[in-house]
Image (cartoon, grey):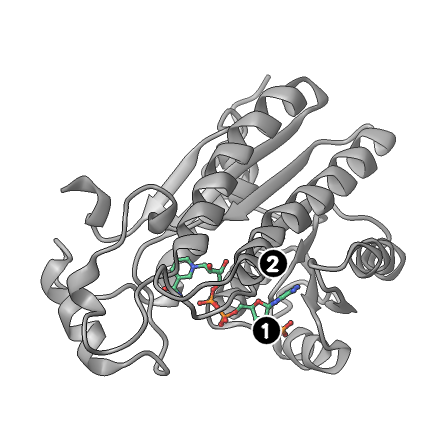
Amino acid sequence: MQEPTIQKLFDLTGRVALITGGSGYLGQALSRALAEAGALVVIGSREQNRAQSVADALPSPWGVIHRAVALDHLNESSLNEGFDAAVSAAGRVDILINNGQQGHALDLTNVTAEAFNKDLQNATGYFLLARRLRDHVVSRSVPGSIVMIGSMYGVVGSYPDAYEGICAASPVQYHTLKGGIVHMTRHLAVYWAKDNVRVNCLSPGPFPSEKAPSQMVERLKVKSPAGRMGEPHELKGPLLLLVSDAGSYVTGQNLLVDGGWTAW
Ligand SMILES: NC(=O)c1ccc[n+]([C@@H]2O[C@H](COP(=O)([O-])OP(=O)(O)OC[C@H]3O[C@@H](n4cnc5c(N)ncnc54)[C@H](OP(=O)(O)O)[C@@H]3O)[C@@H](O)[C@H]2O)c1
């Protein structure tokens, strides 16, 4: 076999990528990474109109028309209808990015059983969508790539000092959820490797949006080895490595992009 060039390895031309939560703070940058690399991107949001406006704003270097679907991953019929709509609008799906996140801002002092269980359902939705992608690519006899968006808080405990006196601590159910997503990644990767379906996790460190309390952000900066917060574009390259042929022998891994936070 002729060795592929680095340009070919990172090229997503001809691939279709579905991303959930594509309207979000990080979701928009991740979507642009996929589009700029040549993929046809299907934006998933709980609101069709919101998804459509994000899809319309994406770059299209080779003239593909990006698509939009309504998809709520906490609702089984909605996630199945959203996946079907993506296949019907784009013709197929080769790459799935499970990025959407719905949670309660309740910490270990006041979270209810109902809120805790509801937040864990994000993992159920990630799994059901991943299985749809796996079955879909296997039925077409083509490779597939799945990326779960985890978190550094799926690997390490909270940093209580950052939140004390400012806002709720990072929720215990969020840590439980993200740790579960990191480990689900390994389990699915093992089962689906021979199906030519790779499953990896991309775990951001601190990437606070402008909505985050500035005092808390300052405390996070002090703790970070890099001394600063991540910028959404700093997830674009790592995502591309995982979804493209550049990462063709990478599966079951959790890539932490955290400015060194978990290296302490
Ligand atoms: N920002 C950080 O510092 C950070 C750090 C570590 C990990 N992460 C992870 O990165 C991912 C993106 O975070 P973000 O900061 O970009 O958050 P965000 O701006 O709040 O975006 C999350 C997106 O999820 C979508 N969403 C919410 N509930 C959903 C559901 N039930 N079904 C489908 N989509 C749903 C929302 O889109 P619609 O309202 O349009 O449906 C929203 O755009 C999350 O998984 C988060 O846990 C973020």
The front one of 131 and 228 is 131
The front one of 177 and 227 is 177
Image-quadrant location for residue 207: bottom left
Point out the tag, 1 or 2, that comes first from the N-terminus. Answer: 1
Q: Which residue corresponds to the image point at 72% horizontal and 22% vertical from the top-left?
A: 195
Check disc 2 and report the residue beneath it: 118
Relative to residue 189, is residue 68 drawn left or right?
A: right
Q: Position of residue 84 (x, y in %)?
A: 87, 54
Relative to residue 71, is residue 85 drawn left or right?
A: right
Q: Is residue 194 above or below residue 155?
A: above
Q: Is residue 187 above or below residue 27?
A: above
**Number of disc labels:** 2
Q: Mark 1 or mark 2: which is in front?
A: 2
Q: Which residue corresponds to the image point at 23% horizontal and 78% vertical from the top-left?
A: 166
Instruction: Tell me the kind of residue under disc 1.
Output: Ser
**Is the shortest distance between ligand 1 and the CB of mark 1 under 8 Å?**
yes
Instruction: Tell me the kind of residue under disc 2.
Output: Lys
Q: What crowding class fits label 1: few (fewer than 14 Cα within 10 Å), some (14-19), or many (20 or more)? A: many
